[in-house]
Every structure is written in C-alpha cells, then in structure tokens.
C-alpha cells in the first residue's frame, strides 16, 4: 500500500497477511477486548430495546456474538464501532446510523454489520454494487443561472480520509498531528485562487477567531452526544484547524468528524462555479496527498471512505439556501422534495429549523450516484422548486409541475 | 501479590504459538483478508497465562515517537498535567494492566478537561485495581500532591468501629439541618467504571443486588434499577433526593464511565430511607447514610454497620472489596482513596459565612465547605455543606471526629457572632 512519505514517521499500512509473515510482530491479542470474551454473549450484548437507529435494528445477539471476537489490524473492535449507537438510543422520527468506522479496515472486518446498515441507509445499496466517482465539472449541465432573487448562497461539501491513519473515533494524537502536518503541507501547495492559510484551533488569536466566526467558518468542539460518544473529540483542540483560501470560497476543516472536510461556497446561485472550484481544489489536493504516499481512502465499492457510514460514496452534500416561503407551506412540498431526491434543513444546518421561509435544500443521497449526478439533481431540482414558488406567487397551481420520482 | 507488569518487549512467542492462537475459519469464504479471530482458549493455553498477548489497540500508537504522542498540557491545570513529563510518558506508554488499561485510558479525562485556574482537579482515573500499581510512577506523585504529601511507602489505617467516635450525637439541631456520610467501594475482580464492559457492569449489579438483598432489620430495603424504573418510583426518588442520573460533567464523561447508560445502574435504599447505595455510577458502589438533624453518631453507626455487613456478604461470594494496606479502599478517582469518606452536615452559618476568617478556620479544622447542591455549587441562605477534607492517611473514625468536633466549634462561633461577640479566642490551631 502507500509509499513511505519522506518527511514523516514511517506509517506502514498493514494487511493481516503482512503481519503474520513478519517475525517481529507478535500474534494479535487485544487484551482490551479479550477480557470481555470471558463473559457470555448475553452478558455483553447491549440492551437495544429502547433504541431506534440503524445499528440497533440490525445488530442481533447472534451477530454480536460472531463479531465480538474480531478486530481490525489497528485494534478497532465491535464495541468501538457501536458505542455511539448504544449510548444514543435515538429519536422516534430521526433515524441515526448508530455506528462509526474506526479505520478503513472496519468496513471490511465488520461487513456483516456494516453492509446491511449501508444498505438500509443508502436505499438498498448492495455489497456487490460498484460506486462511480465523477469529479469532472464539465459533466454538469447548467447550474450557473439559479435565480439569485431566490437562491441566497450555494455550497458543496464533502469529506476525505487519508489512507494509513485511523479515523477520528480511534486515531491517536500522533496520527492526528501527522494528518494535520500532511494536510497543511498539501494545502500550502495550492496556488491561484486556491491560495490560502491555515488557522489551527489551538493558539488562534481572538481576532482570527472572531473573523472566522463572522465568515461562518469556525467550527468548535462538538456538543452533540452522537459525536462525542464516538470518541472523535478526544484531545480537543489538539491538531484541529481551519484552512481557507484568500477569497474565502474554499475551506477545509482538519480533524473534525473526518480527517478532512472540504467546502466550496459563495453567495448567490452560481452552483456551477462552486462545483467547478470544488472539483478542481479536491483533485489538486488529492494529487499532492498521493505524491506524499498517503492517497485518500477509496475503493470501488464504497467510493470515498469516511467515518460515518452515512457519508460513504461521494460524501457530498451540495445545496443552496433558497427562499421558498409559499412552497414550503404547500402540502406537496415534502413529497416533491422526496421525488427530486432532495432534503430540506434549516439554515443552521442539520437538525435546525427554517427561518423566514429560507431553506437549505440539498441532495439526499451520498452513495450509488456520482458527484456530478448529485449536483445535477440539486441544480435541476432547485430550478423546479423556484418555478413552483413563482407559480404560487401568481396564485397559480403547481400540479402540472410535480415531477416523477427520480 | 505482585502485579505482572506487561510490556510488549517481554513477550516472545514462537511461530507455533502464533498460529495456534488463531481459530481456523470453517471456510476461506467466511473470513476476509483483514479479519483476525481471537480464540481465548488457545491464547490462554499457548502462553501459559492470560493476557500475555500484545495490546494492538495501544500497539499502533507505539509506531509514533513519544514526542508525537505526548499530549499538549500547556494550557492545563490539574494534578496529572503538572506531574506527567515526557520521560514519564515514554516509560509508561507501552505498558498495560492485565485487563488492558493503558496510560491514555487513565489520563484522557485530564487531557480533555484542562481544568480551572482555581479548582485543582485530579485529571486521571484508574481503569482497574492494577492501574495503581502498573502506573504508580504517575499515580504515586498524583496521590501525594492531592493528599497532602502521602508517600509511596505510607500505610493507611482503616477504622470502621463506630464505638471509637466520641460524641457526635448532640450537634445543635437549630443549626444542623442534616447529617450524612458517604463512601465508595470497588469490587475485586472487576474493572472500574471507566473501563468495565457491559458484562462486568451487569455482574457487579447482580452481585450487589444479592448482597443488599440479604440486609435485614432497619437495613432491609429494595433495589430500583434505572432502566425500568416507573414514573412514580422515579418521582419518589427525586423527592427523596436519592435519584442520580447520567452525569453531565465532562470530567466524568471523558473518563468513559457514562458508557451504556443506564444499563446496570440503579439505586438501592432501605425502607426507612436512611441508608442508600448507588450501583455503577462513578464507582461500583457508593454507600450513603443520612438523616435529618445533627445526630452524626447515629448516621455513622448505621454507616459502619451497613458497610461491614455488605462487605462480609461480598467476601463470601468470592468478591471482597478492593483494599490495600497502602491505599486503603481502592476507588476510581485517586482523590477518593483511603477511606473514600465524605462525612458532612448541612449547617446554618449565616454570620460565619460573612466572616473573613471562615476559610482559614475551615482549613485549620481540615474541613471544606460546599453549597448544598454538592460539589461545585454555591451556598444558599447561609447554609453550607461542611465536610472533611481528607480521604487518605487518617481513618474513617478520625475523619468523622474532625467533622463532629469542627462543626461544634463552628456553631459555637456562630452563636458568638449572633451576640456580636468576637471569635478570635476560639480560632483553633492547625490540626
């Protein structure tokens, strides 16, 4: 797997067979997990009777018994993966995933649990399915003319994981710092309109902090128990930071919920421009990481590998803040969004309410569709929603505009 | 018994033992290339004793230099942060206890909670009994710092004979609203709350229910598990001020003790509501004796009696309490070692509250004050929670004696101030 990076501590990527062959590596034993095996399955199996998340619905006692004996080469065990779902029973209306990956191998070692979860979460995506990646912005049709009287801003985000390191729930401080160093090097190599600067959370000045808040760029230690229970917030704010370009249209979060979160955004409705910058920036970064011997985690089946199974595939959420005061009150609003494969959120992000009829509209899917396809769904879908809004403004019906299920 | 200190370098398996430890999958299809199956039986037999295996969870961190892994404690103010040096980290990071507790498990709470300029937190917890031995290089100085210079060679005296307490039955009820003594107990053979598994926690709960179920007389009572409590029971426990809920303090949560809440957590209390046991909160057991008024002697009597009865039952079941000659009763937080005892009263001292020498007097009496909401709360209406400061190096009887004597003196001072008389002649020498 990855070549050795010259300026970093050697981080070999283990496959089990490599390890068994090496005489200096001892046989596996994770006493952390071993001890639990002394207790019966029933003693250790979590009580999920009041839970409502994907993991709780799919992790049977038998499956628990089978998977609890395993661990990834980095020592990620079943309990590490499911703890967040055990500690957060969920909500009757909102279906959370209830598990996270601790490293790339988690998706393989614990596939008997994660494949069904992925299938449930991603509309029946099968273990044999292939995911297509398409980051060529030329394939996007239109998208440069969303009506700015309605579309306030456009944004595309995704995540990336760096091969050779454990994911945020499980990574050590040394790994996290290495990820930060690598990322800063990679981002510093960007030029042109992507040229920018890194602001580590630790040691940020008051001024810098205020500026980042005003720009809506700053992220802080998560408060969501869903995230905290996964272990991703350990050692905060060590090795966390924000990078953005000078024009403030391209932003990277380092070591938050994923190794990298990459965001392209700007005011107005020119999603095409946003998506173009997004693809270009991503690909430039990817090249640099590859050169350093640490490509992004990606495979044919899962696409880009991220911490939360809900973000596999493209990890992409492309969306707009759009004013739809009349349409949002229409009884068909929900069904129309569903048919367009879009979702709505408040302008504060996930789990917030809409304010003043302004909604965050974005793609509902992540896996099984390429980046271009998802951005296209947003572009086409939002155009239609605006058309509907205009119809309602004139007091006309929208029945003839209601689309088929995509 | 010397605790085996496991290091990765001390393990030298053969090719044979390596393969023998892996279960053969029934077919090649069943196991992918990166899955490893652990067979506890084979692991035990090939190495002779349990847990001689390397510790993968920790092992991958060792690929990084100590400097890379050493936490940034520059903004921190807790005992762990003051004491943990890079060299110490180097020495301890490849070690683990037999159940797999590592240095990072112990210190994570102190890293994630930098502390407060005024309040000195401990910044580390034990994951099991052996933690105090395997990581003594860190924990002994932390204990010393926290417990007034208690040395690694010191011995702690346990005295739970209530007959040794002098007085304590006559604190003025016009001032003393209630009296309470609490301590913790850990059950040998199980990991502590930051580290224990669900199976262990449930094992602790089962054992505890059995033990408490054997209590009789005025100690006879009932167990209410948090998971299946009815609304009515919950309300009653709230009204009685007995109910505990999932902690919100980041200090506790970061240690891992909140996992799987509310599984295997519960509250037991006797019918007269004067003896209460919390199961699987911050410690395996928290034992509380309390009642209205100032009869601390009675509270302490019941406390000692109840504790000793429970201790006997646990011993009979093959799971005595964790206790050593050096550390006394072993608990999760190093601040609670020794007696784990906090004996205190809610006492009305509105005049003393305003006196400039209150802090100094309390210090000399080896007492501390808190608000009536418990630790980190403010006093309301001049009513303070006054309790012993010490936990280790003095016995239970000695600590409760300090409370009894000290509170009597504080009340005397309060009465003087009520009559506008000075209290200078009453100010005691440092205990």
Image (cartoon, grey):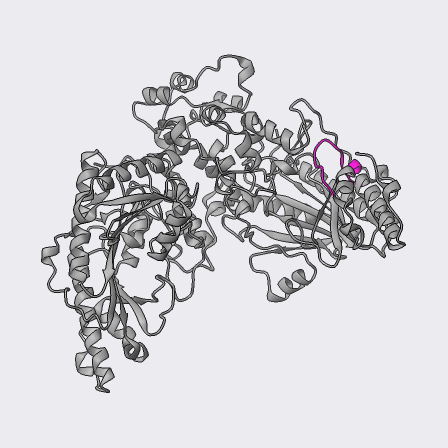
Q: Horizontal placement of A36 versus A236: left or right? A: left
- The answer to whether one can see residue A120 in this image is yes
Residue placed most toward the observer, A227 or A187 = A227
Please state the horizontal and vertical placement of residue B163, each as a whole percent of the image. Answer: 9, 56
Q: Quadrant of the N terminus of chain B?
A: top left
Q: Nearer the viewer, residue B1 or B307?
A: B307
In the picture as drawn, the residue positioned furthest to the top comes out as B27
State the residue at coordinates (76%, 34%).
A370
Q: In the rendered image, is residue B155 in sight?
A: no
Above or below, comparing residue B195 to residue B161 in the picture: above
In magenta, the rendered stretch is A363-375
Position of residue B336 measured from the top left corner of the image (x, y, whole percent): 28, 53
Task: State how many labels appear.
Answer: 0
Q: Residue furthest front?
A: B232
Nearer to me, A261 or B153: A261
In the rendered image, residue A366 lying in the magenta stretch gets the answer yes
Q: Is residue A277 magenta?
A: no
Q: Residue furthest bottom?
A: B420
Camera-side residue of B116 and B292 = B292
Residue B376 % position (x, y):
38, 63
Tell whether A156 sits left or right of B286. right
- Residue A252 location in percent, x, y? 67, 49
Quick one: quadrant of the C terminus of chain B?
bottom left
Question: Seen in the image, is B250 located left or right of residue B158?
Answer: right
Q: Is B210 on the left or on the right of A61, as rendered?
A: left
**Residue drawn 66% across the image and 60% down it:** A212
Dividing the picture into quadrants, the one containing residue A167 is top right
Q: Judge whether A246 appears above or below A307 on screen.
A: below
Query: Which of the 4 image quadrants contains residue A108?
Result: top right
């Amino acid at each position: 797997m990855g070549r050795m990076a010259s300026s970093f501590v050697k981080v070999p990527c283990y496959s089990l067979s490599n390890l068994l062959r090496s005489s200096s590596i001892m046989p596996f034993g994770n006493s952390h997990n071993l001890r639990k095996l002394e207790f019966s399955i029933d003693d250790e199996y979590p009580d999920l009777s009041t839970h409502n998340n994907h993991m709780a619905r799919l992790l049977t006692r038998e499956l628990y018994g089978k998977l609890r004996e395993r661990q990834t080469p980095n020592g990620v065990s079943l309990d590490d993966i499911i703890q967040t779902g055990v500690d957060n029973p969920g909500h009757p209306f909102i279906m959370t995933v209830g598990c996270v990956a601790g490293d790339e191998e988690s998706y393989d070692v614990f596939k008997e649990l994660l494949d069904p979860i992925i299938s449930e979460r991603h509309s029946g995506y099968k273990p044999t399915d292939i995911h297509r990646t398409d980051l060529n912005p030329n394939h996007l049709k239109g998208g440069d003319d969303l009506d700015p009287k309605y579309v306030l801003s456009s944004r595309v985000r995704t995540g990336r994981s760096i091969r050779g390191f454990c994911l945020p729930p499980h990574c050590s401080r040394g790994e996290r710092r290495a990820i930060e160093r690598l990322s800063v090097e990679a981002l510093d190599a960007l030029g042109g309109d992507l040229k920018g600067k890194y602001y580590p959370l630790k040691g940020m000045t008051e001024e810098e902090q205020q500026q980042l808040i005003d720009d809506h760029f700053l992220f802080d230690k998560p408060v969501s128990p869903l995230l905290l229970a996964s272990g991703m917030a350990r050692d905060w704010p060590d090795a966390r930071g924000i990078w953005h370009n000078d024009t403030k249209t391209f932003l990277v979060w380092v070591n938050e919920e994923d190794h990298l979160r990459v965001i392209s955004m700007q005011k107005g409705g020119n999603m095409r421009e946003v998506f173009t910058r997004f693809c270009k920036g991503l690909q430039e970064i990817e090249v640099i990481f590859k050169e350093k011997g640490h490509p992004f985690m990606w495979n044919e089946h899962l696409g880009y590998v991220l911490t939360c199974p809900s973000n596999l595939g493209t990890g992409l959420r492309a969306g707009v803040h759009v004013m739809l005061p009349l349409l949002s009150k229409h009884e068909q609003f929900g069904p129309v969004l569903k048919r367009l494969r879009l979702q709505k959120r408040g302008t504060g992000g996930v789990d917030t309410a809409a304010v003043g009829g302004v909604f965050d509209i974005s793609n509902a899917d992540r896996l099984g569709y390429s980046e271009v396809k998802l951005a296209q769904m947003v572009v086409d879908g939002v155009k239609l929603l605006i058309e509907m809004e205009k119809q309602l403004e004139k007091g006309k019906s929208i029945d003839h505009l209601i689309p088929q299920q995509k | 018994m010397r605790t085996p200190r496991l290091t990765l370098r001390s393990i030298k398996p053969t090719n044979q033992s390596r393969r023998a430890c892996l279960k053969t999958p029934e077919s090649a299809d069943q196991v992918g290339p990166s899955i490893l199956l652990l067979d506890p039986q084979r692991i035990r037999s090939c190495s002779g004793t349990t847990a001689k295996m390397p510790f993968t969870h920790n092992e991958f961190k060792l690929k990084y230099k100590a400097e890379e892994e050493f936490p940034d404690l520059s903004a921190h103010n807790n005992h762990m942060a003051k004491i943990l040096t890079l060299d110490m980290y180097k020495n301890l990071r490849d070690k683990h206890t037999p159940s797999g507790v590592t240095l990072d498990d112990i210190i994570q709470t102190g890293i994630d909670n930098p502390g407060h300029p005024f309040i000195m937190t401990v910044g580390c917890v034990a994951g099991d009994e052996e933690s105090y031995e395997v990581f003594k290089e860190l924990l002994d100085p932390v204990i010393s710092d926290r417990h007034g210079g208690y040395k690694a060679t010191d011995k702690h005296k346990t005295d739970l004979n209530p007959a040794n307490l002098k007085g304590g039955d006559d604190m003025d009820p016009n001032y003393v609203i209630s009296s309470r003594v609490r301590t913790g107990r850990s059950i040998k053979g199980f990991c502590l709350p930051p580290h224990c598994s669900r199976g262990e926690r449930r094992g602790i709960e089962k054992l505890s229910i059995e033990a408490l179920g054997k209590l009789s007389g005025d100690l006879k009572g009932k167990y209410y598990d948090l998971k299946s409590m009815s609304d009515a029971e919950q309300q009653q426990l709230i009204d009685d001020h007995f109910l505990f809920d999932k902690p919100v303090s980041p200090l506790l949560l970061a240690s891992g003790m909140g996992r799987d809440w509310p599984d295997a957590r519960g509250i037991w209390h006797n019918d007269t509501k004067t003896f209460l046991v919390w199961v699987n909160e911050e410690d395996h057991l928290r034992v509380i004796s309390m009642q209205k008024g100032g009869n601390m002697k009675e509270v302490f009597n019941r406390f000692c009696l109840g504790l000793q009865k429970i201790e006997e039952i646990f011993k009979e079941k093959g799971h005595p309490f964790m206790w050593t000659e050096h550390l006394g009763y072993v608990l999760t937080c190093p601040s609670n070692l020794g007696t784990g005892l906090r004996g205190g009263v809610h006492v009305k001292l509105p005049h003393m509250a305003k006196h400039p020498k209150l802090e100094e007097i309390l210090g000399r009496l080896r007492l501390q004050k808190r608000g009536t909401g418990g630790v980190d709360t403010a006093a309301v209406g001049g009513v303070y929670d006054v309790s012993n400061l010490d936990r280790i190096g003095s016995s239970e009887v000695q600590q409760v004696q300090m409370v009894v004597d000290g509170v009597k003196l504080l009340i005397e001072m309060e009465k003087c101030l009520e009559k506008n008389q000075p209290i200078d002649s009453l100010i005691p020498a440092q205990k």
